[in-house]
Amino acid sequence: MNVRMKNSDIISNLPDNITEQILGRLPIRDAVRTSVLSTNWRYKWTTLSDLVFDAQGTHHSTNPPLHLDGDKLVKVIYSILCQHKGPIHKFSLSVRSMSSSYSDIDQWLKHFLSRNGIREFILLFGEGNWYKLHSSLFSCANLRNLSLFGCVIPSPPPTFGGFNDLSCLKLQRVSVSEEGFQNLIAKCPKLYTLNLIHVDGLDGLYIDYAPNLTNLVFIGSPNHICLKNTPHLVHAGLVFTQLPDMNQNIGNGIYNLNFLSNLPSFVAGFYFLKFLAYGSVRKLLPSTFENRYYICIYDLMFEDIDSLSSALGLITSSPNLTQLKIKPSRTTNSAADQMLKTAAEYLEGKLCSIGSLMKLRYVEMKNIVGVGSEMELIKLILAKSPSLEKMKVTTNKTLVGFVERETKILKELIRFPRASKIAEIIHQD
């Protein structure tokens, strides 16, 4: 009995900063359950500043899922919000479908979140009708991080004073008008990270003024690209989901690629590489990218000479390149064998015509299957990289005859000449 009372006293008399740390590391369900530990703990959870609700384990939340349907989840969240005291810095809701309860989210935004200093707001809806955000979102003046998935974003109202502290904006599978997006971006002066992934309503990627933008990711099918006044842009990832309409006049400013000139870190997808292969587009690019130190080529089709040519052009025109990553894309094209042979011959011919990659130190080739054009590119990189320290290669294990194919790949890699005396080839399982 004495031992129990002693332990109870220890729990009850923990310093506030310790109890806050304990509660902050617990899932919301367990944090609420701490109210039964002692009288002193009964209302401790009501001051939690971070409220994270993951209904079905969607989007790989680190918290265990609540496994509640829409109606039950609404009741739980409403009860917690009603009992909550103090500021709410983070509100995160991840649920597959909640279309019948969207009006409740409106009320949470209007009556609880916008008035409690919300800094981080995350809504992730996996299925069902998209949620049209309530305009009270634009009253959350302290927002620093806004992440939306499966939502419709209204245009900011005339009274919108801006998100002056917003540094991170991530939009995926959302709908927003071009005008609404431009008004939003124009009033986020501290925006540091911008992710636009499958955003409906945007005709392209147009940013007129983002003085602190550092990281940009765009996945979509733009009819125009124009970035202006982004002096601090360090990293950009451009993955087109289809080839843009090349019948438009490329030189009329619809595609302004000047921002690529001084970009240190760049990720390019297959259709963007195809886009760069057009002569009229190449004219918009500088002959060298002096500040480029990192390139990632995503979904490279090794049977497509246009994309291979663009990829090789990006690599060889970056004299200060130190890191290169390439992930191939697999094809089901019936003519692929002949195309792969032609591509391999093209790369073999480039071995003598391109200059050395003097500063390249690290290369990663993912998911290769050992086709001729893949091996020729590896051979070229090894032969032209005198400073290379490490090349990491992973092979595709899903193909028939994987073991035999992998053995053949490794034997070829060992035989390739290397310009660097310290270059190490690592095969990673």
Image (cartoon, rainbow, N blue to C red):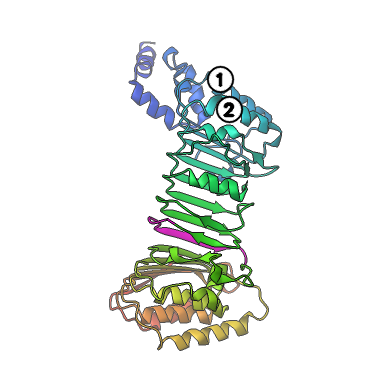
Residue 40 visible (yes or no): yes
Is 234 magenta? The answer is: yes
Q: Which residue is mark 2?
A: 110
Q: Position of residue 5 (x, y in %)?
A: 38, 12
| Left or right, 394 with reference to 339 | left
Give the residues drawn in magenta, as a range. 229-242
Q: Which residue is mark 1?
A: 82
Instruction: Tell me the element at label 1.
Output: helix
Q: Position of residue 417 (x, y in %)?
A: 36, 84
- Residue type at numbered disc 1: Cys
**CA neighbours of label 2 inside 10 A, class few (<14), some (14 to 19), many (20+):** some
Mark-to-mark CA distance, 1 and 2: 13 Å
Q: Position of residue 132 (x, y in %)?
A: 65, 39
- Residue type at numbered disc 2: Lys
**Position of 296 relative to 104 (above/below):** below
**Disc 1 and disc 2 in contact, CB within 8 angstroms:** no
